[in-house]
Image: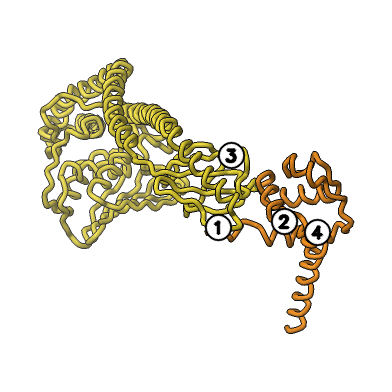
Amino acid sequence: MERKRLLVSKSLDTDLARSEKQTLYRIATLYLLLSIIIIFGFSFMYYTAQKELMLQEKKAELQQDSKDFLLKLKQLHINFDKTQVYPRSKAYESAIFDSDKKLIFATIPTQLSLHKILYLQDAMIHLVSIPESYYLGAKYVIIQVKDNALWYERTKKELLLFNLLAFSVMFVIGYVLLRLFLKPMRDAIHLLDRFIKDTTHELNTPVSTIVNNIEMIDKTKLDAKTLKKINRIDIGAKTISNIYQDLTYLTLGNKIVVNDEKIDLGELLQERVDYFKSLANAKKVFMEVKIVTNTSLFIDRAKLSKLVDNLISNAIKYNKINGYIHIILNKNEIIFEDSGIGIAQENIVKMQERYTRFNNVSGGFGLGLSIVSSIAQEYKLKIKIESEEFAWTKVSLQW
Amino acid sequence: MVRVLSVFLLASILHGGVYQTNCVACHKTLPVSIDKYFYRYLLKYSSEKDVKAAMYHYLQNPSKKKSVMAEAFISRFGVKQKSKLTNKQLQKALNVYWNRYKVFGRLR
């Protein structure tokens, strides 16, 4: 029986490894964040300086207004028994406060601050002055004029230009630096990546040759001793073939050509059970498929085979001598039930993590469950694991 | 209710009374009206608290140094005599004086 193989695209170029990409993103994010903070800091300082400059330019004008207002206030103070009309001007608004900072009168409706001498608030420029004599008890006099915001528009344009320029420069510098810093790591990862890919690729031909040739041998013509040896070779070759398939899936994950089609699950399960028969027989494990309701799924055949293979392979690997494996196909699920060594409850949640292994009885690379989880996630299949340690394990694949 | 109002009215008259009897009565004889003193104090001390405190200290111990009036005014009319009012009466008189001439609420 010919084994369904994962198809990979012919392109041998490699993407950046996931860890490298993650590192790259993290460093890039940090760098960009720092750049933004620095640019924002400079922008803020520039804006503050421009605002201060504008205020200083306006100060003389406001001082003149203040002087004019105080003259009028003085007149009112002298003639307060005759008139109580507060001095007003079209050029400015004003407010007076006593020495306890209690408002005496104001033509300004908003809350005012007396803590600063010259400030901008709500697009209005304010000058706080303290006259030599407190006419009508006014110790603090505030003169308010409207800010024409010309300086603001000019500063905004300058800042926009500066930010764009600075950000572009920082971006280019950052990109060059990142490439420079990551080069050794990139080279090392690519070397390792290339090595794994080349190795797995080189394994393909001999393993396929062994498996195919064993399948071609007419076993009826062999004597019992030779048949036993051939079976052992078959088991060994299939184990290597499984590992090869797992490695291919993991290392060339993004290069696998996906070909989703309608798959008859009953037929596929039977095919995979037949493939593993020699492995199961070697351990005297009884394996059977029970089709309660035959059904089909729209899925990539090679990926589903990989998923089923890993679950069957695990069920054999962690089974007892003379144990059993029941594969039950229902309308919305496939159940893999075995009489194996089981899994401790605390480990069930962790067990889908890549390379997590919970015993050291059998060999292997612990890639299986990670692949199962990854394929199940891709096709939105739910995996439910139930187990009793040292008794049984039941893995349900639901959709 | 009527009783409360009567007590309040009486208290107001009595307060005003201290001011009328002990302040206005004397100042009437002077050529400078009493409000002018108030605005001299306001010009120098600004807030209600500071104005009242300054007036109080001056009336308790009048001196040329403490006076807010001009040199020429003091030379002509001299420094007033020490007030014979009790502290409480003095405070009441000052409250009436402040309320009568304060700027707050009068500007328009």
Q: Which of marks 2 and 4 precedes in the sequence? A: 4
Numbered badge on residue A130: 3
Q: Quadrant of the C terminus of chain A?
A: bottom left
Q: Residue at x 23, y 57 (%)?
A: A329
Q: Nearer the viewer, residue A189 or A391?
A: A189
Q: Nearer the viewer, residue B90 or A101?
A: B90
Numbered badge on residue A84: 1
Subunit that carries the residue with mark 2: B
Q: Residue at x 84, y 60 (%)?
A: B88
In the image, A368: left or right of A127?
left
Subunit that carries the residue with mark 3: A
Separation (CA) of disc 4 from disc 3: 36 Å
Mark 2 neighbour class, 10 Å CA radius: few under 14, some 14 to 19, many 20 or more: some
Subunit that carries the residue with mark 4: B
Which label sits in the foreground, 3 or 1?
1
Which label sits in the foreground, 1 or 4?
4
Residues marked 1 and 4 touching at CB (< 8 Å):
no
Label 1: element kind: loop
Chain letter corresponding to the colour orange: B
Residues marked 1 and 2 touching at CB (< 8 Å):
no
Residue A339, position as x, y percentages in the image: 37, 49
From this view, report whether residue A319 is shown above or below residue A19: below
Q: Can residue A53 be seen in this snapshot?
A: yes
Q: Can residue A186 be seen in this snapshot?
A: no
User: What kind of residue is marked 3?
Assistant: Ile
User: What kind of residue is marked 2?
Assistant: Ile
Separation (CA) of disc 3 from disc 1: 22 Å
Q: Does label 1 lie on the same chain as label 3?
A: yes
Which label sits in the foreground, 2 or 3?
2
